[in-house]
């Protein structure tokens, strides 16, 4: 039997929207308004928080390095205030910290008790993929949720009871909870791909930049900021009122982030052409 294409995503429910620096005023306004609507803060506070969040990656990298033997996940939270949440493997607790970003204090909270580190979780998930698809042939997507200690498996159709034994076997093998999400067809591009789309990962949101084409391979894709996650889901609504939503994972290719650069590019999965691309903008 030929299996349907499978989507694999490592995600986290924590965090909020991060606006890539250097975007247009319209993009910044849209990001702030979305943050305001989701967080219940004023537009001024939303703008300030987004500015702070855009400057957090170096601090997050430092935390990841300092606690590299224990980090289960790191996310940016918006409630009850803006702070960084660090999940830790093991029971040992760490004291709350504070960092200063653009003149504002940002708390760093620690949450111990996780079974795996980031690296261990990814290894367990990767090792389990072939067995999951063998036991659950109708799987259309596998989502890793380290902050929940869970693997979510999207399946076509609505009958989850037939996979009860499979779920129990996967849980025993991975020591993670397994949740089946029924009625999930394979994500695919139903309309078009273009700049200005929403990119989702780890509970945060970034925005696509230009559509680009690799000058050697001629592979087409989309650029975004390097401080965004590497594993991203593209999301955009079609131009037709009431039309379908475009939703599919991007394929990370490369990126650079230093004192002078903050850019990465992602190729599109097969069957998802861009609506337009800039001939002068090549990776």
Image (cartoon, grey):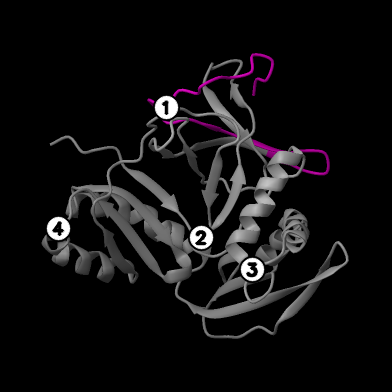
Cα–Cα span, label 4 and label 2: 33 Å
Residue pictured at 70% horizontal, 59% vertical: 61
Label 1: element kind: loop
- Residue 173 to residue 93: above or below: above
Q: Earlier in the sequence, mark 4 or mark 1?
A: 4
Q: In the drawing, does residue 90 fall left or right of residue 209?
A: left
Q: Nearer the viewer, residue 227 or 77?
A: 77
Give the answer, above or below, for where 23 lies relative to 146: above
Element under disc 2: helix
Separation of marks 1 and 2 at Cα, in angstroms? 31 Å
Give the mark, 1 or 3, whose residue is nearer the N terminus: 3
Q: Please state, as top left, top right, bottom left or bottom right, where the C terminus lies in the image.
A: top right
Q: Find numbered disc 4 in the image and state the secondary structure of the residue it sits on.
A: loop
3 or 2: mark nearer the eye? 3
Residue position marked by numbered label 4 in the rendering: 159
The residues bearing labels 4 and 1 have C-alpha atoms spaced at a distance of: 30 Å
Q: Please state which of the two labelled residues, at mark 1 or mark 2, is closer to the viewer.
A: 1
Instruction: Measure the alpha-carbon separation of dots 1 and 3.
Output: 34 Å
**Dominant SS in magenta:** loop
Q: Using the numbered discs, state the Cα–Cα distance from disc 3 to disc 4 in whole angstroms.
A: 36 Å
Give the labeled residue for mark 2.
Answer: 119
Specify which label sits upstream in the sequence, 4 or 2.
Answer: 2
| Residue 75 in picture, x, y percent from top left | 60, 64
Indicate the quadrant where residue 150 lies. Answer: bottom left
Mark 3 vs 2: CB contact within 8 A: no
Which residue bears the numbered disc 3? 78
N-term mark: 1 or 2? 2
């Amino acid at each position: 039997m030929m299996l349907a294409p499978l989507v694999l995503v490592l995600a986290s429910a924590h965090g909020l929207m991060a606006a890539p620096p250097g975007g247009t005023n319209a993009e910044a306004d849209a990001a702030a308004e979305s943050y305001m609507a989701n967080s219940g803060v004023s537009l001024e506070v939303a703008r300030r928080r987004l500015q702070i969040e855009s400057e957090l990656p170096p601090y997050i990298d430092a935390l990841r390095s300092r606690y590299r033997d224990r980090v289960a996940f790191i996310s940016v939270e918006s409630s009850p205030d803006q702070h960084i949440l660090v999940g830790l493997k093991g029971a040992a607790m760490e004291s709350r910290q504070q960092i200063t970003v653009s003149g504002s204090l940002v708390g760093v909270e620690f949450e111990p008790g996780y079974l795996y580190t980031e690296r261990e979780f990814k290894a367990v998930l990767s090792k389990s993929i072939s067995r999951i698809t063998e036991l659950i042939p109708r799987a259309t997507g596998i989502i890793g949720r380290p902050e929940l200690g869970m693997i979510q498996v999207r399946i076509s159709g609505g009958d989850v009871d037939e996979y009860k034994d499979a779920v129990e076997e996967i849980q025993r093998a991975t020591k993670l909870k397994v949740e089946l999400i029924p009625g999930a067809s394979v994500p695919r591009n139903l309309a078009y791909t273009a700049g200005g789309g929403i990119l989702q990962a780890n509970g945060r949101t970034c925005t696509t930049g230009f559509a680009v084409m690799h000058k050697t391979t001629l592979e087409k894709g989309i650029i975004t900021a390097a401080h965004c996650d590497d594993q991203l889901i593209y999301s955009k609504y079609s131009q037709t009122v009431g039309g379908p939503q475009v939703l599919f994972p991007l394929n990370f290719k490369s990126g650079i982030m230093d004192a002078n650069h903050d850019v990465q590019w992602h190729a599109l999965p097969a069957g998802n052409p861009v609506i337009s691309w800039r001939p002068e903008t090549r990776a």
